[in-house]
Amino acid sequence: MVGLSHHLASYDGQNSGAPDNNSFSSLSVPQLTEVLPLTWDVTSDTIAAWVAGTIHLDLLLLKSVAGIFINRILQEQVTGLVETDIIDPCFIPFVRRNTVKTTIIKG
């Protein structure tokens, strides 16, 4: 995964105008390849979950469908592993292991 930084900038929220150099702090984060497998089973969904978890934010996924269906029933909440083609196979295990609160909406 080339091009991902070892550090993320975090705005401190104290300035109402444009952020300056004093408004950012560097967060040391593990390299993406240290926490996600190098496989086609990892897509932008799981990478987005990694970013959200790293900066301690909830994740909102915009998908072409309304959410995850089991037996043609839209699930309001998924608390365990399910087979779905809506998100990649690594996504649910990752968000559960890292407690990343996720909402999927249709866009």
Image: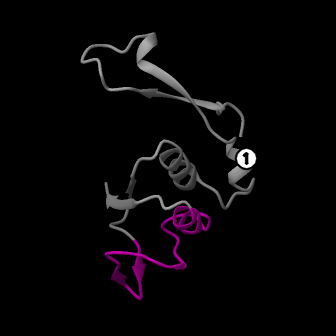
Q: Quadrant of the N terminus?
A: top right
Tell me where residue 81 appears, x and y as whole percent.
54, 78
At horizontal 73% and vertical 57% (from top left) the residue drawn is 39
Horizontal side, residue 63 vs residue 87: left or right = left
Q: Quadrant of the C terminus?
A: bottom left
Horizontal side, residue 82 vs residue 37: left or right = left
> In the figure, 11 relative to 82: above or below?
above
At horizontal 57% and vertical 65% (from top left) the residue drawn is 97
Identify the element where label 1 is drawn.
Answer: helix
Taking the magenta stretch, the answer to whether it contains residue 70 is yes
Q: How is the image coloured?
A: one colour
Q: Amino acid at mark 1?
A: Thr
Closest to the observer: 32 or 68? 32
At horizontal 53% and vertical 71% (from top left) the residue drawn is 85
Taking the magenta stretch, the answer to whether it contains residue 91 is yes
Residue occupied by mark 1: 33
Q: Which residues are magenta?
A: 68-97
Tally of marks: 1
